[in-house]
Image (cartoon, helix red, strand yellow):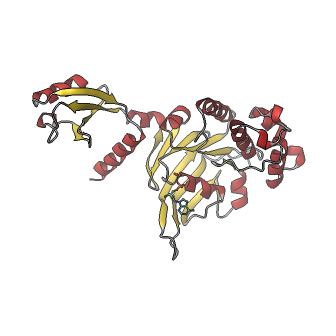
Amino acid sequence: MTDLPEYALEAIDLRKTYGGTKTTPPKEALKGVTLRIKRGSIFGLLGPNGAGKSTFINIFAGLVNKTSGTGVIWGRDIDKEPRDSRAAIGIVPQEINMDVFFTPYETLELMAGFYGVPKSERRSEEILAAVGLTDKRDAYVRQLSGGMKRRLLVAKALVHNPPILVLDEPTAGVDIELRRQLWEYVRELHAAGTTIVLTTHYLEEAQELCDEIAIVDHGEVVACEPKDALLKRMDTKSLVIDPVEPLAAVPKSLAGFEAEIRDGGSLAISYKFGQQSVAEIIEKYNESGARIADLRTEEPDLEDVFMSLTYQDKGDAA
Ligand code: ADP
């Protein structure tokens, strides 16, 4: 096979409903997800906990049965060619579940056997070197540090030399140093030609690593675009003013701004960084006669991005 597919992964109207039995109410985890992940990209599936990211990945891994829709891996339909499609993908799971009584080398050999990789084509030594575990080749897995175990998980996903590597929350609960190491290694794999798909709920991780980002929320894709385009949407900051006297309502003089009074009585005003100035907001605020006890600015976080995206979506539809 010489023709390389345009897309590494394709999901077309993918749906998953869990439960729905007598004892468990139905839970719609994916509500018709369509995504096309280009070959050669580092693609981030970004969303809060419960958004449906693992469900999406696990459908491609063959661990979750979809309710409907189409999944394609490296040009092969996961229903029509389950074995061949899955041969093209390596999945690094979130949980560290490994047989601790094997050595890293044995673990990789077993995995290669599981994938039916002939002995002559196995690359266990090479992969151990790539993830920096050569000197732990014959140690027991239970003696490895948490970081080493994570790297061994990546190694396990690579034994059949897949063109696509999927990492499910690769750095959840991992310290900063190890996170950087893993990012570095993911970049190396990418540079060597592997398409990378990762799920994360850390905005920073997606920002740091990915060239394309899809944001999922409540089982739906709310945005899917190149990172730079997405970041441009995140130029909204907030100015938060603590008034001397409690405010009954947002001052009328601030009518041109998106503003709200928070539970503690602070007034939060959104503004476009670089387009609107804090001085202008304060001037408008002062016009109302209210006084300022304290003020600060807040950077946007993932939640703001979601909020602004869903807000815009509604606006577009209207
Ligand atoms: P994420 O990976 O983004 O955190 P998940 O795909 O794990 O999200 O979960 C999406 C939704 O589906 C959540 O509401 C979760 O509680 C629900 N869910 C996940 N797995 C199951 C399951 N096996 N049975 C029932 N509900 C599930």
Please identify the quarter of the rendering in which residue 55 is found: bottom right
Where residue 185 sits in the image (x, y, percent)? 67, 32
Confirm whether residue 128 shows in the render: yes
Where residue 258 sits in the image (x, y, percent)? 23, 39
Q: Residue furthest bottom?
A: 22
Vertical side of 201 occupied by 10: above or below: below
Residue for point 24% across, 36% down: 266
Q: Is residue 275 left or right of residue 7?
A: left
Residue for point 65% across, 50% down: 74
Q: How many marks?
A: 0
Please identify the quarter of the rendering in which residue 275 is found: top left
Where residue 68 sits in the image (x, y, percent)? 54, 66
Q: Is residue 192 left or right of residue 246?
A: right
Vertical side of 257 occupied by 287: above or below: above
Vertical side of 102 occupied by 280: above or below: above
Please identify the quarter of the rendering in which residue 170 is found: top right
Asked whether 132 or 32 is in front, the reply is 132
Asked whether 144 or 123 is in front, the reply is 144
Confirm whether residue 123 shows in the render: no
Where residue 113 sits in the image (x, y, percent)? 84, 52
Asked whether 16 or 103 is in front, the reply is 103
Residue for point 31% across, 51% down: 314
Residue for point 82% across, 48% down: 101
Q: Residue furthest right?
A: 120
